[in-house]
Structures are given as C-alpha cells and as structure tokens.
Amino acid sequence: MTVADPSPSRRSAPTRADFVAWRQASTRWADIDVYGHMNNARYFELLDTAVNVHLAEATGVDIRELPAVGVVAEVSCRYFREVGYPEPVDLGLAVERLGSRSVTYRIGVFQGEGDEAAAEGRFVHVYVDNTDPARPSTPVPAQIRSALEPLLRPASQG
C-alpha cells in the first residue's frame, strides 16, 4: 500500500486561488544574482514585507507600537521556477494557522500571468510583550487577530 506524503516538501506549487490578500512588488536589477535569477535573500525580504505591510494596513496602526509585537520564529521558502527582472511579482498572503501566541503565514510569489506560484514562503510570527525587555511570549493582540481571521486558509495538500 502506498501512502501519500502530505509534508510541505512534497506538495505541488500552490495556485493563486490558495491566497486571499494581494500586493505587488517591483523587481530590481540588484535583486538578480550571477545566475540570472532573483537572489534568495530578496525572497525573504518580500515575504517579510508582505506580512508586515498587510498587518499595518489591515489594523490601521503602527504595529511596532503595539504592546505585543510579532517576532520571526521561522521562515522558509520553496522554489518552483525562476523569478527575474524587470517584471513585478505578485505576493499572495494566507494564514495557515492562527494560534493563541503565534501565526503561521503562507506567501505565494507569482510572476506573469500563470496560475502556479514561482515560490512559496512560510513565515511564523510569535507574539512577545513589547513593554518588557525580556520579551516573554504573549497572546496575539485582538486587533491583529481580527485582521488575520479573514485570511485563514489551511495549506492545500496538492
């Protein structure tokens, strides 16, 4: 008997339908490495920006000033095809898990008109007390939770 492996490393590329909120980012000449595709570090910058800009826009506040802030606990990216310059990229955002003290995001990176992602990032925020120098973990603030609940979409097992 063969059992399908639904682990993230075995899933196929997500499609645009897997994501809820969208933004577009420009690619820059400096993003491209000597092999002609976007440098890995730039993907991580885009993932971070997609999450934090969405939070700031959806809450209408400076998220850095909240009593609890999200710090990155984990970030990863799976690559399916190259992304290059000069075309912009579309970044799709979904929340895979909204826990009591953490959030797991999925961010799809798309370029061109195709339906399948060129890359998919996973980004985990753990919320910490922004008023305590020791930064103990703390519950996700209500205004953040309200901004993220509409984005909840479990990862497809494609």
Image (tube, grey):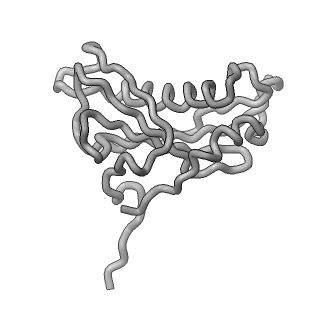
Vertical order, 123 against 134 (above or below): below
Q: In this view, which residue lies farthest toward the bottom? A: 1
Query: Percent x, y for residue 139?
Result: 77, 42
Q: Residue at x 53, y 53 (%)?
A: 153
Residue 134 appearing in the image: no
Q: Residue at x 18, y 21 (%)?
A: 34
- Residue 113, quarter of the rendered image: top left
Query: Percent x, y for residue 16?
Result: 37, 46
Residue 57 appearing in the image: yes
Vertical order, 8 against 22 (above or below): below
Residue closer to the observer: 77 or 59: 59
Q: In this view, which residue lies farthest toward the left? A: 35
Q: Residue at x 23, y 41 (%)?
A: 81
- Residue 51, quarter of the rendered image: top right
In the image, is 95 to the left or to the right of 14?
Answer: right
- The quarter of the image holding the N terminus is bottom left
Query: Percent x, y for residue 5?
Result: 38, 68
In the image, is 56 to the left or to the right of 80?
Answer: right
- The quarter of the image holding the C terminus is bottom left
Q: Residue at x 36, y 37 (%)?
A: 109
Query: Percent x, y for residue 112?
Result: 25, 34
Vertical order, 56 against 118 (above or below): above
Vertical order, 131 against 156 (above or below): above
